[in-house]
Image (cartoon, grey):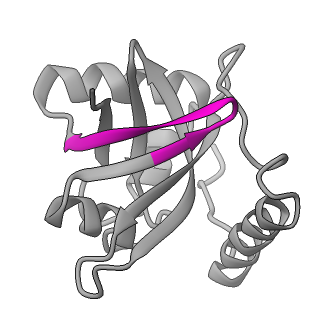
Amino acid sequence: MPQTRVPPRWIVRLAWAVHRAVYRLTRGRLGLWRPRNGRWGAMRLTTRGRRSGRPRSVILAYQEDGPNLVALAMNGWSDGEPAWWLNLRTDPDAHVELAGGSRPVRARAALGAERDRLWDRWRAMNPDLDDFAALRSTPTTVVLLEPLP
């Protein structure tokens, strides 16, 4: 069985930059999509910077779990937590833009059986998920974004 490999960091960062540029240049008409047919969707998450207090936005893959959105706090499968998750740990209230709408959310880490269930849903989309996760020295956080009233 071939070993799972991640593209070089510069390729990952370039892909993220291109995705953000497409979203920005089309004023949000392209770059976000809903999950369907066993595939993840793309959302734009805006958090408050934990140091600056300024809005910080990132485009993330997500799944739906009832009214909740589910993302993986990975840093391109590199070590360290992504800045957006560090921001949410400081201030869990955020805003998401989805294809067709937006809403305020509150973030929390899924734990125990809930985490296992949601991880299995991600694994169903990508059978190599555990191999990618093994490249990190710490477990990948499964983040739930629950809608606020």
Question: Is residue 87 on the magenta stretch?
Answer: no
- The magenta stretch is 96-108
41 is higher (above) or lower (below) than 116: below
108 is higher (above) or lower (below) than 6: above
State the image coordinates of residue 41 (x, y, percent, origin top left): 64, 34
State the image coordinates of residue 66 (x, y, percent, origin top left): 39, 12
Residue at the image position 57 percent from the left and 31 percent from the top = 127
Residue at the image position 21 percent from the left and 53 percent from the top = 92
41 relative to 81 in the view: left or right: right
Res 102 quadrant in image: top right
Give the prevailing secondary structure in the magenta stretch: strand
Res 128 quadrant in image: top right
Outermost residue toward the left in this view: 112
Q: Quadrant of the C terminus?
A: top left
Residue at the image position 28 percent from the left and 80 percent from the top = 53
Q: Is residue 76 visible?
A: no
Residue at the image position 65 percent from the left and 17 percent from the top = 38
146 is higher (above) or lower (below) than 109: above
Q: Is residue 114 visible?
A: yes
